[in-house]
Amino acid sequence: MEIIILLVVASLCVALIFLGLFVWAVKTGQYDDDYSPSVRILFDQQEEKKESNSKIQNLSKAGKQAKA
């Protein structure tokens, strides 16, 4: 029974150490993404272009159906 208590205490200590290291890493900016914001505008423009092209196609289809 004593060994179980020792193992539980040891595992809690290890878990607290990992939690402390994780909090430290987040506070110091280890998980900050510096690359994506500089490239995001490139992807946004491509998506907007695709959306505008699909809207134009939908409008032209609707116009053709209205005439028929």
Image: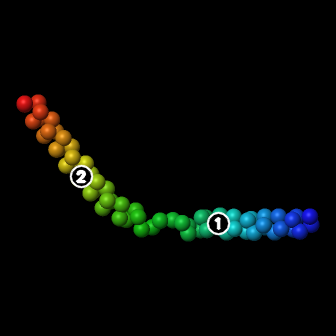
Residue beneath label 1, please? 22
Residue beneath label 2, please? 50
Q: Secondary structure at mark 1?
A: helix
Who is closer to the viewer here, 38 or 7?
7
- The image quarter in which residue 63 lies: top left
Which amino acid does the dot numbered 2 rest on?
A: Lys
- Please state if 2 lies on the left or on the right of 52 as rendered: right
* 67 up-or-down from 58: above or below: above
- Looking at the picture, how far across and down is residue 6, in whole percent? 87, 68
* 60 up-or-down from 4: above or below: above
Q: Secondary structure at mark 2?
A: helix
- The image quarter in which residue 24 lies: bottom right
- Looking at the picture, how far across and down is residue 54, in whole percent? 21, 46
Residue at 36 percent across and 60 percent down: it is: 40
- Please state if 24 lies on the left or on the right of 46 as rendered: right
Dot 2 surroundings within 10 Å: few (below 14), some, or many (20 or more)?
A: few
Q: CA distance from mark 2 to mark 1?
A: 40 Å
* Quadrant location of the C terminus in the rendered image: top left
Which amino acid does the dot numbered 1 rest on?
A: Phe
